[in-house]
Image (tube, rainbow, N blue to C red):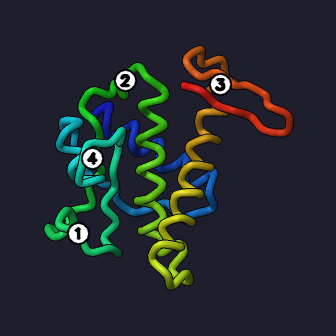
Amino acid sequence: MSTAAELITSLLLWISLNSGYNLPQGAPEIARISHDSLSQMACAKDCPVLGFYPDSKYENPFTRDGVRRIYLDQRMNLEEDICAVSILVHELVHYVQEENNAFEEIGDPKERYIAEEIEAHQIQAKYLYQKAMRGNSTVRVISNGSKLILIC
């Protein structure tokens, strides 16, 4: 198993343990692409996107081949940058949500999208917080009253 495959497997296990979702049987492919291509894919214009998982529940040209694929900005360094890994965590959460039919009870696609994003951001923040508490120096935790702010 390659280092990338080991990372994805460990992150899927972490997501399952920290979300209550069942661990998917497989894993999505990871495609590293240029920022320009990623922006056009996710936003249809230039935008600050770093990762994208085209959920097959929604009609889009990126899932027609039936392969589950996460697209990441090729500039990100998953081997050394925990913040880049957290982007992968966020996108893997969307994969796990889809595999578990999460939020299927929400009929409105916009409301479902919002619920999926909120949960993905919460799980991503939990991942970063755990890394920060273990002494990862690239993640700063700032207390703002009753809120914690995580900065990469």
Which kind of residue does numbered mark 2 sit on? Glu
* Disc 2 secondary structure class: loop
Of the image marks 4 and 3, the number of the one nearer the N terminus: 4
* Mark 4, residue position: 71
* Mark 1, residue position: 60
* Mark 3, residue position: 132
Q: Rounded to the nearest whole Å, what is the CA distance between mark 4 and mark 3?
A: 26 Å
**Front-lying residue, 46 or 51:** 46
Residue 1: which numbered mark, if any? none
In the rendered view, tell whether residue 79 sits above or below residue 28.
above
Which kind of residue does numbered mark 3 sit on? Ala
Label 4: how many residues lie within 10 Å, few (<14), some (14-19) or many (20+)? many
Label 3: how many residues lie within 10 Å, few (<14), some (14-19) or many (20+)? some
* Disc 4 secondary structure class: strand
Frontmost of labels 4 and 1 is 1
Of the image marks 2 and 1, the number of the one nearer the N terminus: 1
Frontmost of labels 2 and 4 is 4
In the rendered view, tell whether residue 102 sits above or below residue 25.
below
Residue 79: which numbered mark, if any? 2
Q: Rounded to the nearest whole Å, what is the CA distance between mark 2 and mark 3?
A: 17 Å
Label 1: how many residues lie within 10 Å, few (<14), some (14-19) or many (20+)? few
Q: Is residue 103 left or right of residue 35?
A: right
Q: Quadrant of the C terminus?
A: top right
